């Protein structure tokens, strides 16, 4: 699909990758960008094409209101996500795994369900911002990995269900990105703009699953060659 002239909705639009999506969509000629954020005062978008929308994706009333307000959307960017940086068994906060599922899986699914009618009518696309950690279990943040894995499988299901209705559903799987979420990770980290560029390129060229950056691409290649070896290496036992 063409970004020029599109009407987009971006979740988690106030910072990080979401803010970069808004900026790039405007730059590429989007007709309107709904910027969903939990604090709509946060994004300082001066462009009159930006419509701020109060949105916590785990709040069903707010999701329904957003979909009703933005019924002209033909590009939904499900970017909002959390990473509580917790292992599974030795978690300090045992609610972290549930919170990650609520945002990364259920919130994203609710957004897709709410926006599907507009997207079907407009013949649009959905971009789900996933992670290479949807494909592997990194022990120090294994509950995040599980939530992203669930969201990746859900994305595949939504892709199959929506394809006959002319709606594409894309998964973007980057390695570490230079945002607040990965503040304490060592470099190298991808610039957020590189992730957005890869997503917009995939919209144009018809690819549905995109690995962004050398780390994600190498891990994906490793999984294809020897899944067990990659799992052992990440678990520190290889
Ligand atoms: N950073 C990385 O290394 C990395 C790597 C791979 C994939 N990703 C994915 O990239 C996406 C964007 O992350 P980021 O790096 O930009 O992280 P970030 O800087 O921490 O931003 C996360 C965004 O999600 C929003 N958000 C969190 N929970 C929400 C909720 N319940 N409802 C609505 N918005 C919510 C946040 O809003 P508030 O400002 O209100 O908290 C914020 O706008 C996420 O899906 C993440 O999993 C990130």
Image (cartoon, rainbow, N blue to C red):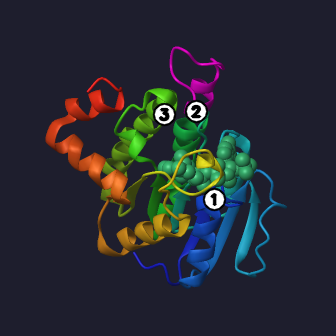
| Distance from mark 1 CB to nearest ligand 1 atom below 8 Å | yes
Numbered disc in front, either 2 or 3: 2
Residue 16: give its label: 1
Numbered disc in front, either 1 or 3: 1
Lower sequence index among marks 1 and 3: 1
Q: Is residue 90 magenta?
A: yes
Report the span colored magenta. 85-101
- Tags 2 and 3 touching, CB below 8 Å: no
Residue 100: give its label: none
Please determine whether, in this image, residue 224 is positioned above or below residue 46: above
Question: Where is residue 80 shown, x and y percent of the image?
Answer: 60, 50
Residue 85: give its label: 2
Q: Is residue 215 visible?
A: yes
Question: Where is residue 172 shown, x and y percent of the image?
Answer: 41, 56
Q: CA distance from mark 1 to mark 3?
A: 20 Å
| Distance from mark 3 CB to nearest ligand 1 atom below 8 Å | no
Can you tell which quarter of the image residue 31 is in? bottom right
Q: Which residue is mark 3?
A: 147
């Amino acid at each position: 699909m063409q970004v020029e002239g599109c009407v987009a909705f971006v979740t988690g639009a106030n910072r990080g990758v979401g803010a970069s999506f808004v900026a790039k969509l405007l730059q590429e000629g989007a007709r309107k960008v709904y910027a969903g954020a939990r604090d709509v005062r946060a994004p300082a978008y001066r462009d009159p094409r930006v419509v701020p929308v109060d949105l916590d994706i785990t709040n069903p009333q707010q999701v329904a209101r957003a979909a009703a307000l933005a019924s002209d959307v033909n590009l939904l960017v499900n970017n909002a996500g959390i990473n509580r940086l917790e292992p599974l068994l030795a978690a300090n906060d045992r609610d972290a795994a549930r919170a990650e599922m609520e945002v990364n899986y259920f919130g994203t699914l609710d957004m897709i369900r709410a926006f599907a009618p507009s997207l079907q009518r407009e013949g649009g696309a959905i971009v789900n911002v996933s992670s290479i950690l949807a494909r592997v279990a990194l022990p120090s943040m294994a509950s995040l990995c599980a939530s992203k894995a669930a969201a990746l499988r859900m994305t595949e299901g939504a892709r199959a269900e929506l394809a006959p209705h002319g709606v594409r559903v894309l998964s973007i799987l980057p390695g570490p990105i230079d945002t607040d979420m990965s503040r304490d990770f060592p470099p190298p980290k991808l610039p957020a703009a590189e992730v957005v560029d890869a997503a917009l390129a995939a919209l144009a060229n018809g690819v549905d699953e995109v690995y962004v950056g050398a780390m994600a691409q190498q891990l994906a290649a490793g999984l294809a060659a020897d899944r067990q070896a990659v799992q052992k290496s990440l678990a520190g036992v290889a």
